[in-house]
Image (cartoon, rainbow, N blue to C red):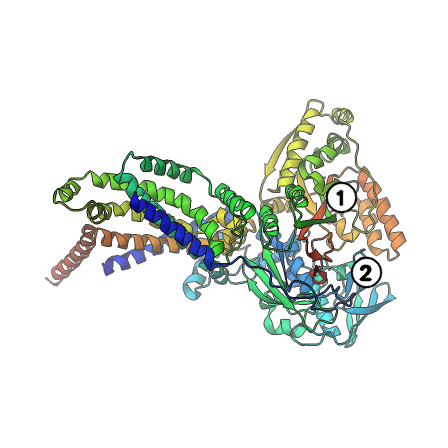
Amino acid sequence: MKRFAQFVSLVLCTTMLLSACGGKPGNPSTSGIASTPGTSSATPGTSSKNELKVAIRAEPSTLDPHNSTALANFAVQRVVYDTLVVQDRNGEIVPGLAESWEVIDELTIRFHLRSGVKFSNGAELTAEDVLFSLQRATTEKGSASMFSSFDAENSEVIDPLTIDIRVKQPFAAIYNYLASARGDIICKSALEEMGAEAYGRSPVGTGPFVLTEWKTGDSLVLTRNENYWGSKPAYEKLTVRVITEAANRSIELETGGVDIIYDVAANDVERLESNDKVKVVSGPGYKFSYITMNMSMAPFDDIRVREALILALDMPTIVNVAYGNSATVADSLMAPTVFGYSKIGPYEYNPERAKQLLAEAGYANGLQVTVMLNEDRNFIDVMEVAQNMWRDVGVETDIQIMDQATLLSKAANGEVPMGVTNSTPTTGDPDHALMIWPTSYKSFLRNSNTKIDEYLEAGKAAYDTTERAAIYKEAMEYMWQQYNLIPICFTNAVYATGVDVENFVCHPGNTPNLAEVTFAP
Amino acid sequence: MYRYIIKRILMMIPVLLGVTFVIFSMMYISEGDPARMILGEGAQESEVEALREELGLNDPFLTRYVNYIKGIVTKGDLGTSYVTGRSVSEEIFDRWPTTMLLAVLSVLLATAIGIPAGIISATKQYSIFDNLAMVLALVGVSMPNFWQGLVLILVFSVYLNILPPSGFYGPIYWILPAVTIGTSTAATITRMTRSSMLDVIHQDYIRTARAKGLSERVTITRHALKNALIPIITTVGLQFGRGLGGAILTESIFSIPGLGKLMVDSIKARNYPVVQGGVLFIAIAFSIINLVVDILYAFADPRIKSQYQSQSRKKKRSTTQEKAGEAA
């Protein structure tokens, strides 16, 4: 027993020694002030901290803007690169690297670049870099699809600080697309010298931060770009940690390990709100979740079945169960944060009418449907409640949960009868938000409706914003009556910060401008 | 002995070929298109097809497998990650030190707890300590790692705020993950040590040692433990091998950038080259651990050493005889 006591003491001593060796990393204290790059006039040096630590949910695969398709990549790209134009806090387009622009004709826009802007490697920004970025955006795999309306071949450099950007057909969303992450301007000479793979790991941009270290699987460390053309950030170092588990991100914030967390889980919000050391920052997001019905498959080619499936669901109850306060019931086909949004719904809950419609369609004795979805917890919750509601009107549901890769392949092959999915149009433009609707889009919905195609083409081409908003309003009212998909909800963008974090503005698309953040003195 | 080691290393080749073939086949038949995952839902079919062609995904199974093996053998090339565009070796070696450290720490902790606890339990069979140790070992074996990890985070990070909940930046960060994995491993080692020691303690030679007047300490450590070590070494080796493969759940819970997490992310993304490279790497690590365990047997038990030596002597003798026969 004596020896056992000695052994226990040894273990305890070792544990204490290990605890003493490492210190919980604190946040070094120096100073700095608020600054909004390009718009505010703050100077660095008066904030109470000199390092901002944020936690995101996935590691960026690359920081090459034209081979990026994940939101995680965009979160970091936001502070490394700049775009020609920028969407401000109200979604308005304001100057970025281009200080002004003029419409030459309906297919050509001339951009005048700021002078004296330098990349992080010291090279000066010229129109050649912009043209190279555009050409790359239209050809590289991560951006070509989205930039297919741009005519890079016929776009031309007028002088070192002027470029004419052309589009293939009238394209009203041009500014939103140029302001998106895929519109980031890269350094031509650096990319040609380094190659795409190395550039994606050590990006050269004109943004307020420069990537200095990438600890694979763990974090990215960025330092302030001292040659930044706009107002410099208030702190010197930005550490972006990758913490996959939502619960862990919350705990890291609560225990002071990080200052800001992205993608706060719905079930953590209440706890975080009751903690006086943290603030929950949330607002309407771009994300729209919905249940699709494959229009090329029976029985979904019968509008009565589609309508019945929609009317049988009490969506406010479903959203409340699955999302709590972190989402609102979808009352349109795109989120209120997207240009051209108009409230149309939600659909009424009318199980009696649903039964009647099913009987009319020949399913009085019941109907069997298959719904495929990925492992998203919210989606699973939605389907579990929906399954019971459909059962009440005689619809039996086979829920098939699979990983995202399998689901996407099945959707591409047209093998998903019903699916649960979402879209996050990071450009904030209806052309992007409604991209699942045209006949040419082969995925979950498999729509084939020339009237919808015509509406969307007209909306794409209308430069006049009033006219454009009217087109989309009419289009969505028509689409709403087609019962092609079952809208679930618009998910809020939910972040949480430490109480000392100031000037953090909620961004609907998960790319808040971290360069604007300051700390309370 | 050296011949035995070389023979074992050569025997690893068919094992590794078998492993690569099985994992290659499994990834081949799994649903989900890597090209579609990379390009996203909105990509046109023609773009997806072009990428499939670029990645060689349209080639027949055997062509792809042969090219893969050829790449490894001739250039040591494990391929390129579909997601990041980096070489698979780089991806694995970035993560491996973390996984290795976690495996070493957890096995050290488990051994430090498990072997003494097992010995004491065996020598004081049915005592309070033995009963308590066995109950704790049962709890340790039964408790899932993910649950234990979460409880530790809640207690030590959230309520007591003395240990960080995630990351792997230094000794203080190592404690919770190492304890999470180490306790369940310790439980296994305790049970194995106890049963192995009990077998030995009742042997005649232990009674003889005691009858000779040897102290209890010498009897247990020099005579009993040494003879009971073989199953214990096997268990520790297996647990260490498992640890090198990456503790998938523990790494996820504590946000540790290890091999397990890389593998899970890669499987979800259908990142075939990384999955294949990772499995091959784990298989090599496991084979080496097994070899080391076999060599350790020889040190623990001289009978096994002489067995290895006699095998090689026998082989040498038969080769000489064959040669002599041929010469005749």
Q: In the image, what residue occupies the spot 64% across and 56% down? A: A259
Q: Which mark is residue A93?
A: 2
Q: Is residue B280 visible?
A: no
Q: Nearer the viewer, residue A23 or A379?
A: A23
Q: Nearer the viewer, mark 2 or mark 1?
A: 2
Residue A198: which quarter of the image?
Answer: bottom right
Farthest residue to the top: give it: A365
Same chain, marks 2 and 1?
yes
Q: Quadrant of the N terminus of chain B?
A: bottom left
- Residue at the spot of label 1: A448
* Position above or below: A489 against A189: above
Q: Quadrant of the C terminus of chain B?
A: bottom left
Marks 2/1: CA–CA distance: 34 Å
* Position above or below: A50 against B229: below
The chain letter under disc 2 is A
Q: Nearer the viewer, residue A206 or A262?
A: A262
Q: Amino acid at mark 1?
A: Ser
Question: Picture coordinates of residue B243 (x, y %)?
Answer: 42, 51
Q: In the image, what residue occupies the spot 63% across and 71% down? A: A191
* Position above or below: A338 against A515: above
The chain letter under disc 1 is A
Q: Which mark is residue B94?
A: none
Compared across the picture, whether B273 is left or right of B232 comes to right
Compared across the picture, whether B58 is left or right of A148 comes to left
Question: Picture coordinates of residue A404 (x, y %)?
Answer: 60, 46
Q: Is residue A490 visible?
A: yes
Q: Nearer the viewer, residue B273 or B197?
A: B197
Question: Picture coordinates of residue B162 (x, y %)?
Answer: 52, 51
